[in-house]
Image (cartoon, rainbow, N blue to C red):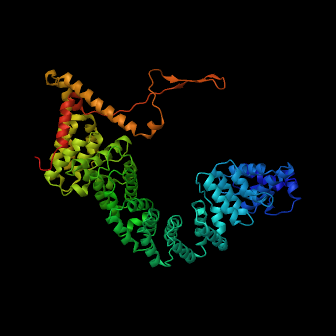
Amino acid sequence: MKGSIVQNIAHKLFLARSDTLEYEPDKHELSLLLKEKSDGYCLKNNKLIFSSYDDRDYYVAYHYFSEMADKSVNSDSSILLTAFSIWEQTLRGDSAIAGLFLSLYEDELDVWQSLLMSERNPYEITSLADQFIKYVKNIDIQKLFNFFFSIYKEKNQYAGHYSSLQERLSNTPQKCHEIIKKFHSDIQPDTIHLYNIALFSLKKQEYTKVIDILIDDIEKSNSVLSPQSLWILGRVIEKSDNKYKYRKILEVIKSAISSPVSLISNAGMQAAVDTIGKIPEIRFVISELFESNNQKIIELLSNKLSITKQLTSHADFQFWLTCICKASMNNDALNNVIFHIFASLAKDESKYGLLADCIFIMIRNNSISEENKSIEVFLHEIVKHQDLLNKLFTLTLIDENLEATIFSRLVATHLFVHENKHVLECCLDTINSFTQKNFIFLVRRILGFISNETQLTSLILSLLKVKNPEKRTYALVKSVIIHEIAMDYPGYVQDEIKRRKDNIKNQRGNMAKLYGEMLAEIDKYISSFAILPRIKELEPPSLLVNNFQKERTKVEARKNDLHEESSIIFNIASKIILKAGIGSFYYNNFNKKGYSEPSYLHEFSSSYSLPRRYVMDNIGYEINMVQFRCAKKDME
């Protein structure tokens, strides 16, 4: 059987991975097309136009079918090999040509058995099987069960994804009932995935019947059937607005949670979590479990909250999140989920207060640390929300508990490392009501924990934005800028103050006057570098300085080693220290190509400013910083 010209054209478009339905034939092809009966396509303006993608796929499948017939090759292995070859070509799209091709042989080939005998991996086998199901004339339930059973047993309990099967079953409820009945006759984990598909397909036409089946199956308390039925029940209720038997469903879920069989109990809790948005009374069941500190419900609900934004408006959301945060101690998996929840809350301004409270709970649990990398997800999000970032930074920096400053330090480090353009400032809503002692305490914390000159300057100058700054913060800001920050970073502070002064519209106002006074003092300080000589006797002993620096280097090296031990990259790759040289090459002995072209190493560097006082007297500087960090609110 020789393939038609239309089949050849469809095949050309298929191999070209073209998504068009049009083809412009040459003169020879056009003459052949005029001789053929038009079916599934038309000729218009000397172009062949397929009626649909299904029609084009039909011709592609028959092209391969004709090729096999011309070669007189009809062995099972050759047919299956061709089908997999077609399937590989369609990986980029949603075409099921391979399944259509296989269906052309269903009368002379046991496709199911051939697929099971294939040496392909389970994903490839089940994907091709699902495409075949789309076009098979009749779904043989027995063969379907045998296929699922064998895949599960022989392919490491692989389940597979069967969208075409679910689509076909949704239009044939009788087949769904046959599958469910057969599964009930022999309940095995090997074929339970088929039971899932049948129920999800059946609910489209017989929703109430599915609920009745699930309730009945759950009440059987079978360790295989009941947990799966609970999971399906939760998913079905979650996606539907039908309130059929809500009261009975609530009773069934409560009964399952109290089951002595852990599989059933856990599945009951999962069903409770899935139905929380549809059955209001479920909230009381979950609250009782939270109050008893049930770790399973905490795990399940936290995962649900991280992917379901609608639940953030639930009446119990604040209670849930607080309990989840309290349970985060020494639980890395839960911490990771919590920070994903925090990241979503950062987009909702009404949740900022709750977010701040939860951050402090996490701090008290030691769930926020430099080693905890899961917080990066949250930090990446909050830098997009300036008000929230400043609020959380300020609140954690001024907390009486010194450990709370870990969060503000992580924020500052994140901004510096990622070279973020966000200008870090104190939260005005927080500091507007400050007393003089509060301002002094805040300044000490800033000086003690922030070392980047940009952040230091912007934080201190942000105090000028409070109400009535002339009386409350002018003198303090001027003193700190001149006697602390400009001492360490004179050049940067001078440029920044000058830039801000130039941007002020009213150059005769109090703010411009304050900036002018600061600049005058900074200019004097910078001029003194050339005028006043450095006195050697006032410098700390060089031996003491060197010993201090050596010990500090050892501590930092140990920290780096610990970070490398927990790093995924260093766990999967070997660290090779280059002794010397500027490039590398290798000898290719396999193909006898000789030496490769050299790969050259290129220089890269990064830099940051050191405080001037640290360079002159590192020990004295560190002592000064410790005093700032340990300051109390009631200190003068």
> Which residue occupies the foreground of this view, 568 or 291?
291
Q: Determine whether 366 is above or below 276 in the image.
A: above
Q: Quadrant of residue 631?
A: top left
Query: Residue 475's x, y, as percent?
Result: 15, 46
For the question of whether residue 520 can be seen, the reply is no
Q: Determine whether 484 is above or below 142 in the image.
A: above
Q: Furthest residue to the left?
A: 636
Q: Determine whether 329 is above or below 269 in the image.
A: above
Left or right: 600 in relation to 485: right
Query: Residue 131's x, y, as percent?
Result: 69, 58
> Which residue occupies the foreground of this view, 249 or 617?
249
> Which residue occupies the foreground of this view, 112 or 312?
112
Which quarter of the image is occupied by the N terminus? bottom right
For the question of whether residue 96 can be seen, the reply is yes
Total numbered badges shown on the rendered structure: 0
Query: Residue 464's x, y, as percent?
Result: 22, 50
Q: Furthest residue to the right?
A: 35
Query: Residue 115's x, y, as percent?
Result: 70, 54
